[in-house]
C-alpha cells in the first residue's frame, strides 16, 4: 500500500467485514475522530470556574449528553496526556458545530487549559463513551454535584429539545455542593433551567445556597412529590454517585451515573480506566456485547462502556 | 513533505519481511482494529497485538494510569481476552484489515508459552510472534522472572521449532546487562529482539499516603524514557547479529531515526498512540520524508549509521565495520568521529 493512502487516513476506511465462529460480522465503526478545534470563547463563570467553547471543524460528530472528549493542548505542552472533559453543551449554527465545557482549573492539565485564549488551537478527540439514555418515559431527575453539573446542563437542554413526549416531562434538576462557591456555573444552570422549563433545586452542606444538606436528602424530600416514576441521571463526586446509586437500587428506581477515571487514551485501547463490575453484571457479562471490543468480566472500562453506567452495573462498595 | 524520491523502507526480521520499519508496540494499539478507522493499519510495518495469555486476564485493580513528568506509568497487568477469543474474534478482524500481524504472547512459565505457540504458531496471517519476556506489572511470569539468560535461551530453543514465523524476544530494560540477555536470545534462536519494554517506576501520592497506582509500581513510558531506551537499544544492537527493534518514547520521525541510527532495524510506536491515534502513520510519513530529504535511498543506508561511531566512545563486546553507504548517509561530524577511530 502506498504512503499516499496512509496519509489520507482521515477519510474513514471501509467498514471491514470478517468471518468468525458466529459467521460474518461487520466491525463496529467508532464515531470518534481527532481534529483541531479553535477556542471560540473562554470566560469565568464564578469562583474560578471556566466556561470554554470550541469551534469544531466540519465532520466532527456531535456529542450527546454524558459523552466526553479528550482535549490535547498544542505541542509543546507541560502535560503529556490529553484530558478527558465532559461536554456541557453543543451549539449548532447552520452547519457549524461548537462544543462547550465547564471546568475548574484544579490540576496541571486544567490549569494549562485555563490559559487558552480565543483563537488558540486545541486538539479534540471524540465524541467518546456512552452518554445518558434520555429517551426514557419516566420523570427525569438530574442530580449534579459541583463540577459534575456539566453533562447535566447538556442533558437538561437535550430533554427540552427532544421529542414532544419528552418535552412534556418536567425535568427536576438537583444541584449540590459543599457551599455556594462550589455550585459550578450556577448562573448557567439557572438560565438553562429557565429556558427548558425545568425546576432547579439547590443544596449546600453549609446552607449558603438553597437547602442545607446534601443532594440525597434533597432527593429524599422531593421523591414523594414527583408526578410519576423518576429516572435519575447523575454526575458528581464518586461518593455522591455511590449514595445516589444505593438509594436508587434500594427503591428499584432506574439510575444512570456518569463516572470519572484517570485515563490515558479514552478509546478503550490502553485498558487504563477500570471500574469494578457488580456481581450481577459479572454474571450477565457477555464480552461480545460490550463496545470496548475486549471488555472483561471483572472490570468495565470507564471510557468505552461508560462513562455513564446504570446503578446495577457497578460494585459500589469497590468504587473508589 | 519534501518532493524527494520515495525511500525503500523494507526491512527483514528473520523470515518476516516488512514493508517498513514502523510497528505498533504491544498494549498500545489494542488488537489492531480499534484505530483502524483513523489510520491504514495495512500500511504499517506490522501491528503487534496486545499480549495474549492462555486464559483471559482481568488485569490489575485501579488506578492503572498515572501521568509523570514527560511520561506515564501504567499498571494494566496484561488484561487480555485469552487465547480462544484472540483466535476466534480478534485475529479474523485484523486479517480482514490486511495488516501484517505480529502476535504478542505472554506466559508465566515456558510451558505456557509453548502451549500458546503450539496453538498460534501456524495461524494463517500471523507473520511473527513477540514473546513478552518483560511485563513489569504481573506477580508471576514478569520481567524479573525472565531476566535470566539461561532461562531465555532454553525457552526460545523449545519455542523455535513451533513456528515458521519470526520469533521476537521483547526485553526489559531493568536488567544488569541487556547485552547478555540479547546474546542469550540470539543463541536460543530468536529472529529479532525488542529493546525495550517499560521501566519499572513509582509515583507516590503524598496526599493519600500511597501509590498513585493500584500497585506500588508500574511501567514508565513516554518521552521520559527515550534516552534510557536508546542506550539499551544501542547496547543490545552492538551485542548481537540479529535485528533489534527499538522501542521507548518514540513520538515522531526524528525519534525513530535516532533509534535506527544507533542500530535498530525497526521501531515500535507506543504511548504516543494513546495521545494521537494516528501517530504510527505520522511517524512513518516523517521517516520517509526525513530520509528522502537527506538523500537516503534505502533504510539499510541509514540503519546503524551511528552505531559504530558511538561505539568508539563506548567500548563494547563487539565491533563491526561501518558499511560504505551508511558512512555516506552520516552527518559530516559523525563521519569524522568514525574516521578518528
Image: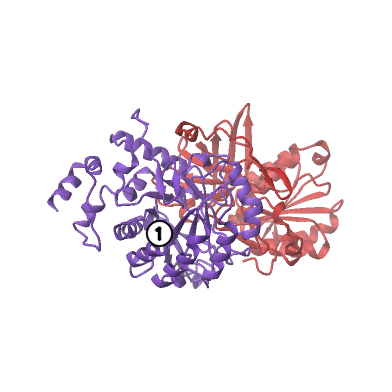
Chain colours: A red, B purple
Q: Residue at x 24, y 54 (%)?
A: B320
The correct choice, above or below, for B155 with respect to A121 in the image is: below
Where is residue A67 shown, x and y percent of the image?
64, 46
Q: Residues within 10 Å of mark 1 (few under 14, many from 20)?
A: many
Chain that bears disc 1: B
Q: Residue furthest left?
A: B340
Q: Residue at x 75, y 61 (%)?
A: A312
Q: Is residue A50 visible?
A: yes
Q: Residue at x 64, y 61 (%)?
A: A275
Where is residue A202 shown, x and y percent of the image?
69, 55
Q: Residue furthest front?
A: B161
Where is residue A174 shown, x and y percent of the image?
72, 54
Q: Secondary structure at mark 1?
A: loop
In which quadrant will I find the N terminus of chain B? top left
Where is residue A252 shown, x and y percent of the image?
83, 61
Q: Which residue bears the numbered disc 1?
A: B196
Q: Is residue A68 visible?
A: no
Q: Residue at x 44, y 44 (%)?
A: B18
In this image, A178 relative to B305: left or right?
A: right
In this image, B258 relative to A41: left or right?
A: left
Amino acid at each position: 500500500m502506498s504512503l499516499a493512502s496512509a496519509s489520507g487516513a482521515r477519510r474513514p476506511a471501509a467498514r471491514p467485514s470478517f468471518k468468525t465462529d458466529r459467521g460474518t460480522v461487520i466491525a463496529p465503526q467508532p464515531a470518534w475522530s481527532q481534529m483541531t478545534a479553535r477556542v471560540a470563547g473562554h470566560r469565568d463563570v464564578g469562583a474560578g470556574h471556566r466556561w470554554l467553547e470550541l469551534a469544531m471543524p466540519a465532520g466532527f460528530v456531535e456529542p450527546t449528553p454524558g459523552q466526553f472528549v479528550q482535549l490535547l493542548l498544542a505541542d509543546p505542552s507541560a502535560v503529556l496526556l490529553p484530558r478527558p472533559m465532559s461536554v456541557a453543551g453543543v451549539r449548532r449554527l447552520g452547519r457549524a458545530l461548537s462544543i462547550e465545557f465547564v471546568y475548574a482549573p484544579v490540576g496541571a492539565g486544567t490549569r494549562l487549559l485555563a490559559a487558552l485564549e480565543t483563537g488558540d488551537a486545541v486538539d479534540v478527540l471524540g465524541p467518546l463513551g456512552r452518554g445518558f439514555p434520555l429517551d426514557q418515559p419516566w420523570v427525569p431527575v438530574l442530580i449534579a454535584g459541583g463540577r459534575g453539573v456539566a453533562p447535566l446542563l447538556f442533558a437538561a437542554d437535550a430533554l427540552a429539545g427532544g421529542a414532544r413526549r419528552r418535552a412534556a416531562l418536567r425535568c427536576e434538576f438537583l444541584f449540590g455542593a459543599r457551599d455556594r462557591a462550589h455550585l459550578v456555573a450556577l448562573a448557567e444552570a439557572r438560565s438553562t433551567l429557565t429556558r427548558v422549563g425545568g425546576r432547579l433545586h439547590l443544596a449546600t452542606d453549609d446552607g449558603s445556597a438553597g437547602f442545607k444538606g446534601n443532594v440525597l436528602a434533597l432527593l429524599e424530600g422531593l421523591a414523594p412529590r414527583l408526578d410519576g416514576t423518576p429516572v435519575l441521571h447523575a454526575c458528581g463526586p464518586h461518593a455522591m454517585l455511590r449514595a445516589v446509586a444505593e438509594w436508587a437500587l434500594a427503591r428499584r428506581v432506574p439510575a444512570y451515573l456518569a463516572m470519572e477515571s484517570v485515563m490515558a487514551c479514552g478509546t478503550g485501547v490502553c485498558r487504563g480506566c477500570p471500574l469494578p463490575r457488580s456481581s450481577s453484571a459479572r454474571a450477565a457479562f457477555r464480552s461480545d456485547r460490550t463496545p470496548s471490543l475486549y471488555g472483561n468480566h471483572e472490570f468495565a472500562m470507564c471510557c468505552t462502556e461508560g462513562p455513564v453506567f446504570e446503578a446495577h452495573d457497578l460494585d459500589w462498595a469497590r468504587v473508589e | 513533505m519534501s518532493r524527494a524520491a520515495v525511500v525503500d523502507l523494507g526491512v527483514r526480521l528473520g523470515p518476516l519481511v516488512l514493508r517498513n520499519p514502523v510497528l505498533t508496540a504491544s498494549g498500545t494499539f489494542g488488537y489492531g482494529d480499534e484505530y483502524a478507522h483513523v489510520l491504514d493499519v495495512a500500511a504499517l510495518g506490522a501491528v503487534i497485538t496486545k499480549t495474549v495469555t492462555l486464559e483471559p486476564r482481568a488485569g490489575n485493580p485501579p488506578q492503572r494510569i498515572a501521568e509523570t513528568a514527560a511520561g506515564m506509568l501504567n499498571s494494566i497487568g496484561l488484561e487480555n481476552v485469552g487465547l480462544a477469543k484472540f483466535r476466534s474474534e480478534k485475529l479474523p478482524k485484523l486479517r480482514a484489515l490486511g495488516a501484517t500481524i505480529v502476535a504478542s504472547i505472554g506466559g508465566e512459565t515456558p510451558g505456557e508459552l509453548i502451549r500458546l505457540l503450539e496453538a498460534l504458531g501456524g495461524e494463517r496471517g500471523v507473520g511473527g510472534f513477540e514473546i513478552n519476556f518483560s511485563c513489569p506489572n504481573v506477580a508471576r511470569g514478569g520481567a524479573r522472572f525472565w531476566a535470566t539468560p539461561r532461562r531465555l535461551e532454553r525457552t526460545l530453543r523449545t519455542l523455535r521449532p513451533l513456528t515458521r514465523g519470526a520469533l521476537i524476544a521483547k526485553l526489559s530494560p531493568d536488567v544488569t546487562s541487556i547485552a547478555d540477555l540479547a546474546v542469550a536470545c540470539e543463541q536460543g534462536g530468536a529472529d529479532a529482539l525488542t529493546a525495550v519494554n517499560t521501566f519499572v517506576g513509582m509515583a507516590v501520592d503524598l496526599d493519600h499516603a500511597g501509590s498513585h497506582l493500584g500497585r506500588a509500581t508500574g511501567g514508565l513510558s513516554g518521552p521520559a524514557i527515550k534516552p534510557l531506551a536508546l542506550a539499551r537499544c544501542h547496547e543490545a544492537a552492538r551485542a548481537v547479529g540479529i535485528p533489534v527493534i527499538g522501542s521507548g518514547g518514540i513520538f515522531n520521525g526524528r525519534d525513530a531515526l535516532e533509534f535506527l541510527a544507533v542500530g535498530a532495524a525497526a521501531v515500535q510506536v507506543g504511548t504516543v498512540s494513546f495521545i494521537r491515534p494516528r501517530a504510527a502513520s505520522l511517524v512513518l510519513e516523517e521517516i520517509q520524508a526525513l530520509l528522502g530529504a537527506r538523500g537516503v535511498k534505502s533504510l539499510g543506508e541509514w540503519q546503524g549509521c551511528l552505531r559504530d561511531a558511538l561505539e568508539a566512545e563506548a567500548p563494547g563486546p563487539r565491533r563491526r565495520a561501518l558499511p560504505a553507504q551508511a558512512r555516506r548517509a552520516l552527518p559530516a561530524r559523525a563521519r569524522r568521529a568514525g574516521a578518528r577511530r
